[in-house]
Amino acid sequence: MALTDVSVLLVEDDSVFRQLLADFLIQQGAVVFEACDGDEGVVEFQSHIVDIVIADLSMPRLGGLGMLKQILKINPAIPSIVISGNNVMADVVEALRYGASDYLVKPVADLKIIEQAIEQAISPANSPEQSFDSIEFGPLDFTDRDAVMNSAASMSQDLSYQELSDNFTLLEHNAEAAKSVQQQLFPASNVHYPKAQIHYSLCKNSDVSAYFIDSTMVGDNHLIMYMAHFHPEDNRAAFGCVLLRSFVNQKLKLYRNGLSTTLVEPFNMLSYLNDRMVNSGLNLYVDIVYVALELNNFRVAIGQAGSGLRCYLRNDSGIAPLALSESLQLGTVEWNKPSMQFRTLMPNEKICIASNTSHHRNLLMKNKFDGLFYDEDLPAGGFMELEVI
C-alpha cells in the first residue's frame, strides 16, 4: 500500500470528516494519530514521532495556523498539509509562509487527492539530502552545498498541480473570487520592519490588478521586496499573485530551516521562479524586479526580468534609473538569466521600483503612498519604495 507505515497526525474538529479521513488513511497503510483542535494537536505532536501533519485551518481554541507556528518551533522539518473550508486565501497563504507543504479545499471530492499530497510531501525527492547534479549559478559565488539545496527546493512542496489547475480555473472565470483573493494578499500602504520600511501605491482600473508587490524579513539581517506585472492582464493575474507568493513562501521555509539561501540571492531566486512558472503550464508571464537588502551593511542585490518595470535610486536630489540590461519575462521557456546590479546604499538613499510610466514616477516624487486603490481614469500600475531607518 502506498502509505504503509507512514505516521500521520490528523488534526480536525469535524469528527465525521476526521473519522472518514482517518479510516481512509489507515486503509492505505498509514498509522494515524488524531486530535480535535490545535492544542490537542501540539500535545500529540510532542507525544509521537510523525512523518506528516494534516490540519484544518479553522478550529475552536487553537486553530491550524497557530498550531503550525508552535510545531514549527518543535520540529521544523516535518511537512504539513492544511485544509481550508472557508475560502479565506489569506489564511492559506499565511500557512504556506509558516511551512505548510500544500493545501486542500473542503469539501474534498476524492480522498485520493490527500493520499497524493502526502506522497508528494514526504517523497525522498523532496528531501534536502537527496543527490542532484550540479547546476550553474552565474556570477555569484556559492558553495556546492547551496547548489544541492536550491535544486532540491526547486522540486519540492509547491501547490499540487491539481490544486493549481482547479483554483486557476475558478479565478479565471469568477471576477468576484479573483478580486477577493487578491485583496487579501496586499499589505497596508506602509509596512514597517525593525530596520527599514516600505511604502507603495498601486492603482488598478479593473477588478483585478495585473501588478503585485510583496516584502518580508528573511532572518534578522535580510529584507526582500519585489514588484511584479502579470500577463495577460485579466482575472488570472490574481492567481499569479497566489502562485508567486507560494513559491516565495517555500523558499522562506527552507531558509528558516537552514537549507537554502536562494531567497536572498536575486539571480538564483528569479531563475527558480522562472522554472516554476514554466512548469506550472499556466501560460502566465511576469515582469519582475526583485531586491534583497543586507541590513547590517546596506548591501543591495537587484535582479530584473522583463522590461515593464524599472528600478530607481532615490535621494534628496531626485530619482535616477539604475542601469539593468534587458531580460526576457519569467515564464518563458527561452529565458536565460536575469539582469543584475549590486550596490551599497549611501545615507538617505532609497531603492524604488515603478511601472514604466511618467505618471507613476511623478506620484512617487510627491510621496503619494496610497496602497492599493481603484481609479478607472488613471493608468494601472504604481511604485514601491524601500527606506532604511
Image (cartoon, helix red, strand yellow):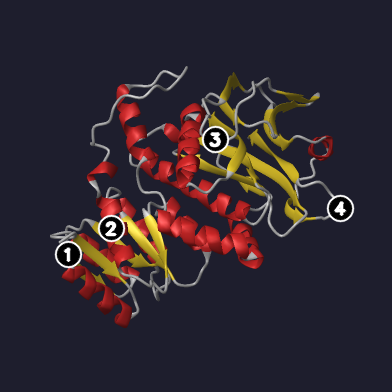
Note whether residue 186 is visible. Answer: no
Q: Residues within 10 Å of mark 2 (few under 14, many from 20)?
A: many
CA–CA distance between discs 3 and 2? 30 Å
Asked if labels 4 and 3 touch by Cβ distance under 8 angstroms, the answer is no
First in residue order: circle 3 vs circle 4: 3
Quadrant into which the C terminus falls? top right
Q: Is mark 2 on a helix, strand or loop?
A: helix
In this view, the residue farthest toward the bottom is 16
Quadrant into which the N terminus falls? bottom left
In the displayed structure image, the side of residue 65 where residue 194 appears, left or right: right
Amino acid type, callout 3:
Thr
Amino acid type, callout 1:
Ala
First in residue order: circle 3 vs circle 1: 1
Q: Tell me what residue is drawn at x 29 percent, y 59 percent.
A: 116
Q: Residues within 10 Å of mark 3 (few under 14, many from 20)?
A: some
CA–CA distance between discs 3 and 1? 41 Å
Identify the residue under disc 1: 30
First in residue order: circle 2 vs circle 4: 2
Identify the residue under disc 2: 118
Amino acid type, callout 2:
Ile
CA–CA distance between discs 2 and 4? 48 Å
Asked if labels 1 and 3 touch by Cβ distance under 8 angstroms, the answer is no
Residue 150 falls in image quadrant:
top left
CA–CA distance between discs 3 and 4? 32 Å
Asked if labels 2 and 1 touch by Cβ distance under 8 angstroms, the answer is yes
CA–CA distance between discs 1 and 4? 58 Å
Identify the residue under disc 3: 332
In the displayed structure image, the side of residue 336 where residue 13 appears, left or right: left
